[in-house]
Amino acid sequence: MSLNSPLDISRLFLAAFSTQMFRYYEDRIPQDASLLVVSNHRSFMDAMILMAALSSPIRFACHHYMGQVPILREIVTGQLGCFPLETIPNRQQSFFAQSQMLLQSKQMVGVFPEGAEPMVQSTPASMVGEFQRGFAHLALRSAVPDLAILPVAIASLEEVNTTAFPLKLLSLFDPSEPLFNQSGWHPLVIYHRVAVLIGRPYWITTQHQQKYHGKQAKNVVSELTEHCQNEIANLLRQGCY
């Protein structure tokens, strides 16, 4: 087995941590489509969990600081294929441009719409936070045929909670992020047993794109965002038993 691909590295990483993964509803994964994967996010292991669960490399948008920290940058971008977001003034434009290019080439793109907060603030395994709407705007403005948004829930069944490093250390690499400008330590969640529950795909149709104009745009963005957030919340209630 080659260990050069993000999928191989993800599987090896989970094996090294002796993480048991249980996958549910895999028949919902669309075939021969462009996929935008959205998921809840509490652990540094989440991207690798999702790649292993979907049996495919996924190009994840990740926090800006991950592209700035030596060694971490080489692992996250070089080995796992993630693309760090830009600083705030250029963040949205850069995210759209990179993601559209990847989706058009039939590569899976992954997004954690809760942002960095669940990673920084310790949150219960069964809780999903408010979704940011950038992924919905991306899907609706992308001229990508056969595009589906795939909501996926990562439900921790057994985990270890520890700490990694002071939060203020991250502000050296991204001073624009207010979450890093506080005392305390960055939580670290390590899964021992985890369930991955795949939701119903949300297909982007020409009707959706036609509504993404004028007064209707806000409604269709809200509908898409709420569908994915509710789907993941419902799956978490099933998985966290």
Image (cartoon, rainbow, N blue to C red):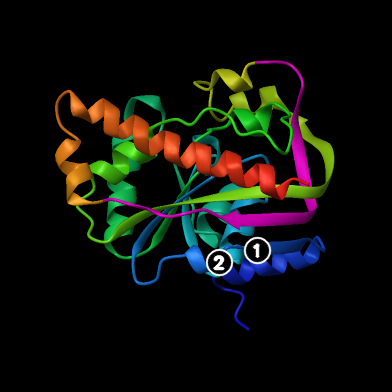
- x, y percent for residue 225: 41, 35
Residue shown at the point (67%, 51%) measured from the top left: 45
Residue at image coords 38%, 40%: 135
The range drawn in magenta is: 182-204
* Image location (x, y in percent) of residue 128: 61, 34
Amino acid residing under circle 1? Arg
Q: Which mark is residue 26?
A: 2
Residue under pointer 1: 23
Question: Badge 2: how crowded within 10 Å, few (<14), some, or many (20+)?
Answer: few
The type of residue carrying mark 2 is: Glu
105 magenta-colored:
no
Which secondary structure, mark 1? strand
Tell me if residue 69 can be seen: no
| Residue 102, x across and y down, in percent | 33, 57
How packed mark 1 is, by other alpha carbons closer than 10 Å (few <14, some 14-19, many 20 or more), is some
Compared to residue 169, the image places residue 34 above or below, namely below
In reply to whether residue 187 is colored magenta, the answer given is: yes
